[in-house]
């Protein structure tokens, strides 16, 4: 396992232990995919992020987001928490906005005082949920068919 800096943050709260927990690994360029997955599993948090050198020249940094089971292309609290950790570690944006590269693409983040806000990336899917999948969800949630009013991606 490479050496690294690691932070655990409370996202969405200024009160310790009241926010959404997030693990952030800074300078994770030397991690393999398997090491990222193993580390995320070890933290046992909903998400763990790894900050890397960007591939896209427009980005300030790149983030990869892992749950205990898989990698995610994008997620809200990891986006904001990773940005906060990057700034706290001395990251300096190239422009007025912070540009974070993640698997879904580039995410623009605005900073106003101590607040961060992102512009959501485009959806990967839209439209109705396929009937077989909707049925699996209905059964898992133990809903009667008439309790589902509508569904969409």
Image: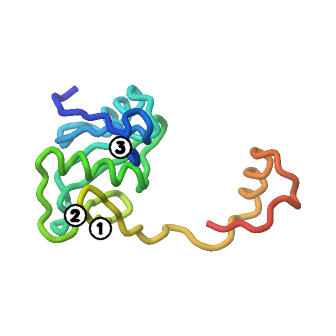
Which residue in the structure is indicated by mark 2? 98
Which residue in the structure is indicated by mark 3? 14
Comparing marks 1 and 3, which lies closer to the viewer? 3
Q: Residue sitting at 32 percent across and 43 percent down?
A: 49
Circle 1 residues within 10 Å: few <14, some 14–19, many ≥20: some
Circle 2 residues within 10 Å: few <14, some 14–19, many ≥20: many
> Alpha carbon of mark 2 to alpha carbon of mark 1: how far?
6 Å
Percent of width and height locating residue 78: 37, 49
Which residue in the structure is indicated by mark 1? 108
Query: Which image quadrant: the N terminus?
Result: top left
Of label 1 and label 3, which has the lower sequence position? 3
Query: Which image quadrant: the C terminus?
Result: bottom right
Please state if 41 lies on the left or on the right of 4 as rendered. Answer: right
> Alpha carbon of mark 3 to alpha carbon of mark 2: how far?
21 Å
Comparing marks 3 and 2, which lies closer to the viewer? 3
Q: Residue sitting at 39 percent across and 28 percent down?
A: 43
Callout 2: SS:
strand
Q: How many marks?
A: 3
Percent of width and height locating residue 59: 20, 64
Q: Are marks 2 and 1 in contact (CB under 8 Å)?
A: yes
């Amino acid at each position: 396992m490479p050496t690294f800096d690691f932070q655990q943050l409370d996202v969405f709260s200024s009160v310790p232990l009241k926010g959404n927990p997030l693990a952030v690994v800074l300078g994770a360029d030397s991690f393999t995919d398997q090491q990222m997955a193993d580390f995320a599993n070890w933290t046992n948090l909903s998400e763990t992020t790894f900050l890397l050198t960007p591939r896209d020249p427009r980005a300030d940094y790149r983030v990869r987001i892992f749950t205990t089971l898989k990698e995610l292309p994008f997620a809200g609290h990891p986006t904001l928490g990773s940005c906060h950790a990057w700034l706290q570690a001395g990251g300096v944006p190239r422009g007025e906005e912070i540009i974070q590269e993640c698997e879904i693409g580039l995410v623009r983040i605005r900073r106003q005082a101590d607040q961060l806000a992102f512009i959501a990336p485009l959806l990967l899917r839209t439209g109705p949920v396929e009937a077989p999948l909707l049925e699996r969800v209905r059964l898992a949630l133990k809903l009667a068919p008439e309790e589902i009013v509508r569904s969409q991606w």
